[in-house]
Image (cartoon, rainbow, N blue to C red):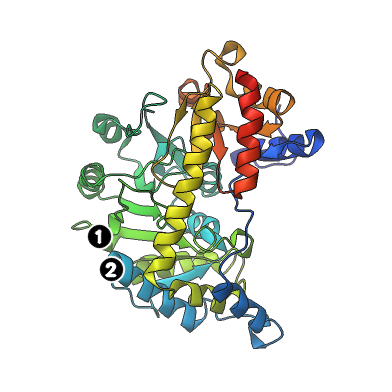
C-alpha cells in the first residue's frame, strides 16, 4: 500500500525496522543491541571544548563550509592518517553528519535516471539519498563467509561489479569499513573498484566513517589514495563514531575543489550550517595523539570478542567482523522458516535482547541473500554486553 501524499520516488521508505525494534526493546525491557550507537561518553578532551564553546559566539551560525579551525583539522587529520593533501579552504566541507554529506553528494552529482553502483547489503540511507536525487541503484552483492569461521571475510565477484556498470552509471558509492557487515575492503578489491571507476569514467563517493574502528588483522585503505582516483573521489568522514558523539552530527567531505563546490551548493539549501559549538570540539578530537585512535579500536575489538563469543556459545552461528560496531548471525536452522525478521521479533521474548534483521540492508532484487541474517551491535558497556550474553546463553541451556 502506498503512503498518502508521499512522492513516488520515496514510496517504500517508511518507518524503519530500527524504530520497530527499539520500541520492542522498551516494551519488553530488553537490552537493545539493534541500533549502533555507543552508550558511553566521548573523551574529555573533546567534551570539555564543546562545553566551553556553549555560551560564546560559537552558538551562532558558523561559516557555510564549516569553521576554518575544523576544516584545517580535517585536512591535517587526513594528511596524517591517509597521506592525502586537501586544501582546507576549497577541498573540505563540514556537513550535518556523514548522512548529509552523502545525501548532498547524490543531490549535487546525480541526474534523474542516472545509476549509482553500490555494494549490498547497503546502509539504508544510501537508497533514500539516491531516490531523492531521482537516481537508480545498481547493487553488487557481497557474499558472507561461513559463520563461526574466524578470519573468513565477505567477498564479491569482480564480474558482478563490472556487470553492474551500464552506460547510465554516474558514480560508485563505496562504504569501507562497511556497515552492516564489518568488512574492510582489501587493496586488491579496491584495485578492482578503481579499474571499473576509471574505465567507465565514474565518480567515486567513499564513506569512511568507521576508519578508526578497524581490528587486528585488517587495514583500512582509503580508495582516494589509489592511482588516478583522488581527482574523481569524494571522501566522507564523521566525528560521531570516532568520538562517541553520534548525536552531534558533525561530518565532512574532502575532494577536488570542483566536486566539493558542487556538494556545497546542495548542502547550503539543506541544513545551511550546523553544530556551531561542536565544531571546535571535533577539531580538538582530530588532533588527539595516535594512542587515542589505536586505543578505541583495541577496546572495541575486546567488546566484539565478548559478544561474538557469547553469541556462539548460545548456539548462534556468527560472522566476526573486521571493523565497525556490528556482528552478523545466521539464523538458518534456528528461526522458523529461516526468517531473520521473525527471529528478531521473537528474540526479546525468548532472551530479553533486541537485534535487527539484516535483510533490510538488501534491495528487493537480492532480498533472499540477507533474509536469514541478523545484526547485533557491540558498541556497549561491558556490563551491558555481559548481561546480554548471559540472557542469550539461556536459549541454549
Q: Position of residue 339 (x, y in %)?
A: 58, 18
Q: Position of residue 175 (x, y in %)?
A: 40, 47
Q: Position of residue 261 (x, y in %)?
A: 42, 70
Marks 1 & 2, CB-CB < 8 Å contact: yes
For label 1, the residue is 225
Q: Is residue 235 left or right of residue 345?
A: left
Residue in front for this viewpoint, 364 or 122: 122
Residue at image position (40%, 56%) is 211
Residue at image position (21%, 43%) is 188
Residue 362 visible from this viewpoint:
no
260 vs 204: above or below: below
Residue in front for this viewpoint, 74 or 86: 74
- Label tally: 2
373 vs 53: above or below: above
Task: Tell me where residue 359 sits by quadrant.
Answer: top right
User: What's the CA distance linking mark 1 and mark 2?
Assistant: 7 Å
Q: Position of residue 271 (x, y in %)?
A: 62, 66
Amino acid at each position: 500500500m502506498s503512503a498518502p501524499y508521499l512522492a513516488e520516488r520515496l514510496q517504500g521508505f517508511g518507518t524503519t525496522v530500527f524504530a520497530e525494534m527499539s520500541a520492542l526493546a522498551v516494551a519488553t525491557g530488553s537490552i537493545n543491541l539493534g541500533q549502533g550507537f555507543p552508550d558511553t561518553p566521548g573523551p574529555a578532551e573533546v567534551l570539555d571544548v564543546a562545553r566551553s564553546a556553549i555560551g560564546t559566539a560559537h552558538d551562532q551560525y558558523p561559516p557555510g563550509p564549516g569553521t576554518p579551525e575544523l576544516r584545517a583539522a580535517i585536512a591535517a587529520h587526513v594528511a596524517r592518517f591517509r597521506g592525502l593533501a586537501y586544501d582546507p579552504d576549497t577541498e573540505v566541507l563540514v556537513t550535518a553528519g556523514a548522512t548529509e554529506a552523502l545525501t548532498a553528494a547524490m543531490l549535487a552529482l546525480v541526474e534523474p535516471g542516472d545509476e549509482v553502483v553500490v555494494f549490498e547489503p547497503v546502509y539504508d540511507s544510501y537508497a533514500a539519498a539516491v531516490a531523492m536525487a531521482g537516481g537508480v541503484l545498481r547493487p553488487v552483492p557481497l557474499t558472507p563467509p561461513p559463520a563461526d569461521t574466524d578470519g573468513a571475510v565477505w567477498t564479491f565477484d569482480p564480474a558482478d561489479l563490472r556487470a553492474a556498470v551500464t552506460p547510465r552509471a554516474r558514480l560508485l558509492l563505496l562504504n569501507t569499513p562497511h556497515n552492516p557487515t564489518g568488512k574492510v575492503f582489501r587493496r586488491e578489491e579496491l584495485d578492482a573498484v578503481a579499474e571499473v571507476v576509471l574505465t567507465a569514467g565514474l565518480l567515486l563517493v567513499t564513506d569512511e566513517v568507521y576508519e578508526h574502528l578497524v581490528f587486528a588483522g585488517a587495514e583500512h585503505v582509503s580508495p582516494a589514495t589509489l592511482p588516478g582516483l583522488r581527482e574523481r573521489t569524494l571522501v566522507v568522514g564523521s566525528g560521531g563514531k570516532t568520538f562517541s558523539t553520534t548525536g552531534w552530527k558533525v561530518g565532512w567531505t574532502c575532494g577536488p575543489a570542483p566536486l566539493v563546490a558542487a556538494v556545497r551548493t546542495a548542502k547550503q539549501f539543506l541544513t545551511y550550517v550546523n553544530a556551531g559549538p561542536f565544531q571546535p570540539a571535533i577539531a580538538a578530537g582530530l588532533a588527539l595523539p595516535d594512542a587515542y585512535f589505536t586505543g578505541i579500536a583495541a577496546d572495541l575489538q575486546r567488546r566484539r570478542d565478548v559478544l561474538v563469543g557469547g553469541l556462539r556459545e548460545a548456539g548462534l552461528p556468527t560472522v566476526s567482523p573486521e571493523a565497525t560496531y556490528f556482528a552478523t548471525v545466521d539464523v538458518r536452522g534456528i528461526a522458523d522458516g529461516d526468517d531473520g525478521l521473525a527471529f528478531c521479533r521473537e528474540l526479546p521474548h525468548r532472551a530479553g535482547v533486541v537485534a535487527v534483521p539484516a535483510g533490510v540492508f538488501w534491495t528487493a532484487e537480492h532480498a533472499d541473500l540477507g533474509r536469514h541474517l541478523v545484526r547485533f551491535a557491540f558498541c556497549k558497556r561491558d556490563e551491558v554486553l555481559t548481561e546480554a550474553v548471559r540472557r542469550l546463553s539461556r536459549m541454549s541451556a
